[in-house]
Amino acid sequence: MSSFEQLGIRAEILLALQELGFETPTPVQEKAIPHLLGSDRDVVALAQTGTGKTAAFGIPLLERLDPQERTVQALVLAPTRELCVQITKDLERFAAHLPGVRCVPVYGGANIREQIRAIQRGANVVVATPGRLIDLIDRGAIDLGRVRTAVLDEADEMLNMGFQEDLTTILERTPEDKRTWLFSATMSGEVRRIAKNYMREADEIGVGGTGKANTAIEHRYTVVMMRDRYLALKRFVDVEPDLFGIVFCRTKQDTQELAENLTRDGYNADAIHGDLSQQQRDRVMERYRSKTLQLLIATDVAARGIDVSNVSHVIHFDLPGEVESYTHRSGRTGRAGKTGVSLSIIGSKDVFKIRNLERQLKTHFTYTRVPGGAEICERQLLTLIGKIKEVEVDEEGISRFMDAVELDLAGFTREELIKRVVSLEFNRFLEQYRDARDLNVDLARKDHNPRERREKTEFTRATGEMRPMFINLGTADGFDKGRMLGYLCGITGLTNQHIGKILLKDMYSFVDIDAKHFDEVLGHFRNANYKGRKVRVDEGTGGPRGDRPQHKPVGAHPGKHRYQKARY
């Protein structure tokens, strides 16, 4: 007898769970399912993201449905369309052997008329985002007067996203004697107010303690110069060839730029954020679920509801402002009894944020060094050898070609063949990391003192070892000095010790470059593009030091980047 059978679940749902491969209930399922099946009281359940909350409320919800009644009997509210779709799919799988159960997802970005028709065909479960459900209520397209069970999933996030008024409007349209189940990762003041105002003496179910981190997740952090975060990210990806992760950025623009840079550098990455259409979001998520993408670059809001199995790493390219956001981010990994890694790539000024997270989450963050070139090359080589050993040989398929292959390779010894096979895949990493510098910031070392770094740069500039470079990007393209420095370091791989003063103009800039690396920098920009247009670089005769540009723009239109010699 399986553990789920001991929870009192009906045979039809048990059969569906068996077919889905469910064997042992998670702690939240083990606590919540019997309680929700056996009690008519309202319930507040606190459990971390990724602990199986959908089954915890979905199974009791389905148990209490009357499939013969073609009215909305159960309402599930979720913060995002991705989570809305995911909950609907899960409920449909759990109800595979329950004839008459119809679940309809309702969310923005999809055709509202089709959603209305689906409800009119007899939906008895509606899974909705608050905004779209309000639209349906205003149109008179849905009747919530027969709702018996209302579920607020990830209630803390719905409140963080500003849905409090919508929740009030929706819950006021439901019967007073309904049962309300509130599921949340945190018990914030807003969540407590919702529970107080709209729930009747609710029972509270807690799993793992409020505010504690998921013990299945290993929390790590690394400290680098802020301009080196991108290089550090690539190294962590390279040292873990089987990494399958989500990278979090603060803004929509940052996610898009990071995804474009990673794609340009040969990584399988794409972005998901609020500016994408529903069709674009679905296409990105389909690629990620099928693991065609290795890295999904996301904002906090866009990532809510992403339920993808086997996510090995969550990487915080920008730390979130709230501990709740960190908890929800990290919850994308370490799901369904598996372990995961939550890695924060930070500058030295953000170390105090890690200490605050340790204190609030009551867990330990492990300091991790950015891997060096030798470590990356060794790991890549061992992975390649492992793939060669495990590859399945299609004897019949390749037999017709083997005579020609053996003839062509007859002149090589066994050792030469091994070296060539390895080098075919391995040369890129050898070349990239042959002279790779150490990206780690040792907070105890004096040479990381900002004042000493400035003095060293000023000395280099004063000795005449810098050459001014012209670039056709400026403030009109959204650059300030910090963004320009980060952009140049990301393209060239240099550090601020090789980049001097930066003079920004509207449509062009001048940057002092270490003379030893000047030609190398020009080479990096040979085929560079920025937001769809070609980046031009050249040597400037004046540059930042003289504030006298060699080129100046022709024409008043800010979108035209044509230049001519200027006489002074």
Image: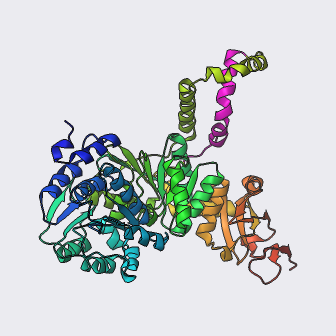
Toward the viewer: 251 or 198?
A: 198
Queried whether the magenta region covers residue 367, the answer comes back as: no
Q: Is residue 384 left or right of residue 525?
A: left
433 to 141, vertically: above or below = above
Q: Check the image and name the residue furthest to the front.
A: 68
Image quarter (top left, top right, bottom left or bottom right) of the C terminus: bottom right
Task: Confirm whether residue 213 shows in the render.
Answer: no
**Horizontal and vertical percent position of residue 488:** 66, 61
Q: Give coordinates of residue 82: x percent, y percent.
A: 43, 61
From which residue to which does the magenta span run?
A: 413-438
Magenta part, dominant SS: helix
The reply to whether residue 250 is visible in this rendering is yes
Residue at (72%, 62%) from the top-left corner? 529
In percent of width and height, residue 548 lies at 78, 76
Q: Residue at 29% of width from left, 69% of height from top?
A: 71
The reply, left or right, for residue 453 in relation to residue 185 is right
Judge whether 7 appears above or below 146 on screen. above
Q: Quadrant of residue 566?
A: bottom right
Quadrant location of the N terminus in the rendered image: top left
Residue nearest the viewer, comparing 254 with 32 = 32
Name the foreground residue: 263 vs 407: 407
The residue located at (26%, 74%) in the rendering is 190
